Image (cartoon, helix red, strand yellow):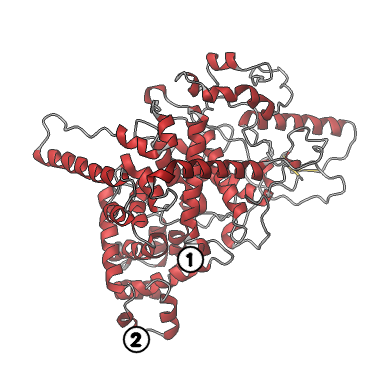
Amino acid sequence: MFSSSSSGKKASPQQEMVQVDRSDSGSPFWRAPQKDAPLKKTTTRDSGKVVGAAYSHADMLKFDSLNLSNAGSRPRTPPPSNAAIGRTTSNSTASPHIKGVTSPPFQNYMNFITSTNEDWAADDADDVYAYEDDGDDDFGLPSLSSMKRRSHRIAAKTEQGTSRGTATNTLTDSTGRRYSDSADIAIERPASTYPMPKKTEGKILRPQYRDILRDPANALHLINHPSVPPNASQKEIDAVNSRITRINKFKKILQASTIPLNDLRALAWSGVPEEVRAMTWQLLLSYLPTSSERRVATLERKRKEYLDGVRQAFERAGGAPPPSTGKGGGGNRGLDEAIWHQISIDVPRTNPHIELYGYEATQRSLERILYVWAVRHPASGYVQGINDLVTPFWQVFLGTYITDPDIESGMDPGQLPRAVLDAVEADTFWCLTKLLDGIQDHYIVAQPGIQRQVAALRDLTQRIDAGLAKHLEEENVEFIQFSFRWMNCLLMREISVKNTIRMWDTYMAEEQGFSEFHLYVCAAFLVKWSDKLVKMDFQEIMMFLQSLPTREWTEKDIELLLSEAYIWQSLFKGSSAHLKGQPSSRANSLNFQL
């Protein structure tokens, strides 16, 4: 059973938050102003500047592409179809869009969902794509439209209170902008806009998705082997035949009554075909049992445990709602607002260049995964960078139920059956938990795991490329200045999600892939740019390492990097002979990895 509270702790520099004015939006945790509360100082800023949480790698973000303002060009998720509207009862009220029409009273989503839950169990394939974006979500978190309506009501009440001479805890700057004194910065973040799926690029849900939900092994029977293109060269024919052979090898292992993990690891080291990747990852992380007889029961139990944990973490605390917020106000949710606030800032920043992660359904799913993990691990809580580690799992598991392997664009996950989204979310949570269990000291106070890996990377670089290490020292470049992000986000800020997925195939095939092998990957990654770095001064080095030319990297580039890392691991891991001549303190720091 999950705990709904998190122990307090001093935030690391990477976790510090900056209060900003974004008063034009409602907040899921808006609390009533306290009459006797002292007014808070609020820093003014230019309206065109994006300001948020202090990010250890914010210099890598292209703020122009984040589109956090209401005037953005990305349209909202489309409203439900006429058929879907016809199925809803009178409790479900559409959000008005006509100018001058008053917004309807706030509706409780728990009442609404009672009349619409049956839609997800519909047998008709057309029915399961209905999407309703009004009201709260399943766990009491308001949707975009309900947040806007609440912000309008709050603004109206504030103006009414001012006209009557009542005191309100608000500050106004020279531009007339009003700042909230709600003790929750999240109220000042503008409501996000979401992309609209392109009908010509719509993805198709597998008709057999219910069978796959029950047992991922059922997807193995649906694999369509790649066909040889017409007029193909002999090289292309050999590549297709090689791929078919490799898929069949995985299928033979995965369909066994008891799966041999050593054989699966040996095969997965050089890459996993996307058709079998989800099940392979679940097995390598020990989320799925190796026995086929236990697989169905285990999946059902773990998914239910996660969903029960989400309901517990997001359940409303007892007592009447604050009078100024009305029913559904944030003051009675019983959530850890500091954790939730940081997550709500970071999730919209996650892969902002990929359409899939711009949809409301995707962002809400990531928020729940991160929050539940944080409250279950109070020693670390949520730390910036963990939001990146969720995305490879979420993308791989979602792809299991879609016929088109390219799911990064053209598909709104909110239009999928709820059972599919629940399964993807639960599987992602448990696999993320398995990953972080091996590197949790990366995210506790002072992040000692990252500190040790940075020190080990410095010493490993001295052995592999002494000239580069000496040049970095002469230019006063500290390894932590550029490699902290490499360890914290597992290089996900340097390479694409698709390339990260390929790299994680090998990490999972290694027994200590994320905690040990990753060090050698970082060393190979740094040494790869040695010829350029030794010709640069401090400023040029830092600018180059903060924006590496890896955007066009392919799977072949990742495989070459992994091969080089394997060589360094074979040469230096556990080899005490290479410690000769090093200071004893430095040798001790290397015991962690080398």
Query: What's the residue type where badge 1 is placed?
Result: Ile
Q: Residue at x 79, y 37 (%)?
A: 321
* CA gap, disc 1 and disc 2: 25 Å
Local secondary structure at mark 1 = helix
Residue 261, position as x, y percentages in the image = 33, 54
Image quadrant in which you'd find residue 277: top left
User: Is 410 displayed left or right of 9 in the figure?
Assistant: left
Residue 485, compared with residue 146, is above or below; it is: below
Q: Note whether residue 475 is visible.
A: no
Quick one: label 2, few (<14), some, or many (20+) residues within 10 Å?
Answer: few
User: Is 328 displayed left or right of 297 in the figure?
Assistant: right
Quick one: label 1, few (<14), some, or many (20+) residues within 10 Å?
Answer: many
- The residue pinned by badge 1 equals 450
Query: What's the residue type where badge 2 is placed?
Result: Gly
Nearest to the observer: residue 561 or residue 378:
378
- The residue pinned by badge 2 equals 581
Cβ atoms under marks 1 and 2 closer than 8 Å: no
Quarter of the rendering occupied by the C terminus: bottom left
Label 1 vs 2, first from the N-terminus:
1
Residue 19, position as x, y percentages in the image = 67, 50
Nearest to the observer: residue 43 or residue 494:
494
Residue 104, compared with residue 5, is above or below; it is: above
Local secondary structure at mark 2 = loop
Residue 503, position as x, y percentages in the image = 34, 53
Residue 25, compared with residue 531, is above or below; it is: above
